[in-house]
Amino acid sequence: MDFTVKKYKELLEALLEQKYSFQTFDDYLKDPNDRVVMLRHDVDDLPSHSLRFAKIQHNLGIQGVYYFRAVPQSWNEKIIKKIASLGHEVGYHYETMDTADGNLVKAWDQFKQHLEALRKLVPVSTICMHGSPRSKFDNKELWMKYGYKALDLIGEPYYDIDFDKVLYLTDTGRRWDGHKVSVRDKVKSKYDHSFHSTDDIISALNRSGLPDQIMFNFHPQRWHNNNWHWAEEYVIQNAKNMVKRIFFVSR
């Protein structure tokens, strides 16, 4: 079974076996290691799953970055503080073009309010766009008018990483090749690695077949050990993927 907590740990152990170092996004921007993995986690829902991932990483002596949305299903202040206390980076997973219905001024005001609220809990130096395939707005459109670096933010992955140097692997759609029909979660890159399962990635690692710099994007709410919840997520995500394919083809 793929997309289990056990499989997640196997992937981390395979990366360690291949002598990758691990940096938060903030640390990478300030002083990137030559052979490095950035573990990015979009906390869209079920923040307890992200805390479980954070504890696994902490026990292995590695760090990641966790981006929290300013919505009830993501924003859990106790978990936000706990993840930061384990040595991980916490950032803001913004979606204010969606919540402001495309109004740039309102979206900017909301962005600043949410960022300030998060900074009252933990230090925040980076942000990352939340991309809803059902929305007609791209949340990155906020930066057509405003600049996040004016708020002492040093980076946004979709703007501040050279993906011709950093391989980007995302579990969007609960599969590692879901970017092919993803509406938002995709990047332009010279790399053409095609993996479907986590085992495909682990096999490539064991062959030393991956580049020296990698960013993974995980959505921890999709990873389950409980068989019932695993099957439920499998059915729901497959249905979502069918809708995304239709939307992708129609664009």
Image (tube, rainbow, N blue to C red):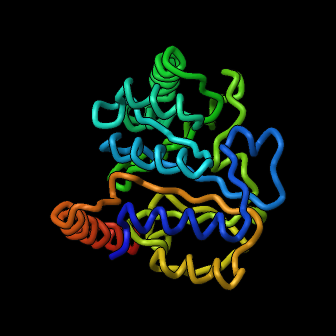
Left or right position of 173 against 232:
right
Residue at 61% over, 45% down: 63
Residue 149 visible in the picture: yes
Left or right position of 216 against 78:
right
Image coords of residue 234 (percent x, y):
25, 69
Residue 224 vertical placement versus 179 (above, below): above
Left or right position of 246 against 117:
left
* Nearer-the-camera pick, 197 or 97: 197
Residue 110 vertical placement versus 102 (above, below): above
Q: Quadrant of the C terminus?
A: bottom left
* Nearer-the-camera pick, 236 or 206: 206
Image coords of residue 188 (percent x, y):
66, 65
Image coords of residue 86 (percent x, y):
54, 34
Residue at 52% over, 43% down: 129
Residue at 68% over, 66% down: 167
Q: Quadrant of the N terminus?
A: bottom left
Quadrant position of residue 3: bottom left
Residue 179 vertical placement versus 125 (above, below): below
Image coords of residue 5 (percent x, y):
38, 60
* Nearer-the-camera pick, 160 or 202: 202
Residue 105 visible in the picture: no
Q: How many discs mark residues in the rendered view? A: 0
* Nearer-the-camera pick, 193 or 131: 193
Residue at 42% over, 54% down: 219
Left or right position of 44 against 111:
left
Residue 89 vertical placement versus 36 (above, below): above
